[in-house]
Image: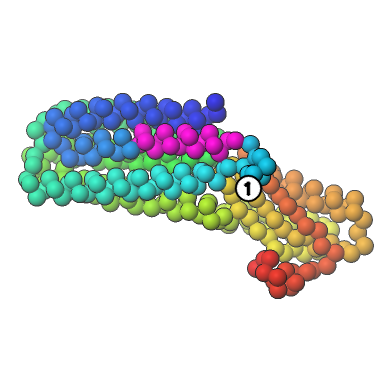
Amino acid sequence: MSLERKATFVAIVVSIILAIVKLIVGIMSGSVAVLASALDSILDMVVSIFNNIALKIAESKPDKKFNYGKSKIEGLAALFEGIIIIGSGLFVIYEAIKKIIHKEVITDVDASIYVMAFSIIVVSGLVAFLSYVAKKTNNLIIKSDTLHYKTDLLTNSAVLISLIIVKLTGWYFVDFILSIIIGIYIIKEALEIVKEGIEVLLDVALDEEIVEKIKEIIKKEPLVLDFHCLRTRKAGNRNFVDVHLVLTPDMKLKLAHTIVENVEEKIRQIDPSKKWIINIHADPYDDSYINKLLEECE
């Protein structure tokens, strides 16, 4: 089993434990914020299960039907996770408003404080582990999960602060107001995840910084006269690069091949942790105007 899938299994177990503890205390105490946090933990569990399945599919090797593999499912998983988180944010806001209307109060502040403190400790450990895996693998699904649990860590901290304020001042409305703020924040963070997932599915180009590095590599290659039709995209742990290099018309095939290999190797060194699928077309003259007419490139 890959490190990424192990990470999702750890996230599933943590989410189950937190969801059970928070539900029990939330129902007993009547705290909207704790119940909202419990719901978020349940959704965390569902999302982590889906992510585990998505990772298994994404790791499958290319075949005759899927020549480039199925790594784009990572974008679909991020999109799904974002939508789920948006739903949880809306529900948190709904529950907080309902509690305000019915003027419900927290009956056991101490228990709520203890469970949120416990949650912060556990989630901190999980975030540290997921951050390590995300940094090592650069996997979009793990990155999304890390961001998700970082959001949980912040919201849990906010809930704990509100509960302490309620205990010290008796201002129960703080719990409800903070729940609404938490809901809005959850939705905001989720929209970023959705955006990134959609970009992957729509073949967004590599980061501008990486594209500029690719251009610099090509420009510095001594025997390359020019280049055009540079296109990039990413899918999972794979970076795709297509480009046309303009070489001298009378250049021998062996030398042209060597130049292409040199450029490819230098591009791969931009980020060795990635799998690079590079397609370089060697032109004996600048045919960019023809490609523009054919709409093959910008």
Count of numbered tags: 1
The magenta stretch spans residue 54 = yes
Say which quadrant the C terminus sits in.
Answer: bottom right
Give above or below for 87 relative to 223: above
Tell me the SS state at disc 1: strand
Give 114 or 48, whichever is nearer the viewer.
48
Residue 135 seen in the figure: no
For the N terminus, give its image quadrant.
top right
Task: Say if the magenta span includes residue 251.
Answer: no
Q: Identity of the amino acid at label 1? A: Asn
- Name the residue that disc number 1 marks: 239
- Relative height, residue 111 to residue 83 (above, below): above
Residue 148's image quarter? top left
Q: Residue at x 60, y 35 (%)?
A: 60
Q: Position of residue 183 (x, y in %)?
A: 26, 48
Q: Is residue 113 left or right of residue 58?
A: left
Q: What x and y, as percent, mark residue 68?
A: 64, 45
Query: Which contiguous range is marked in magenta?
Result: 44-60
Is the residue 135 above or below the residue 267 in the image? above
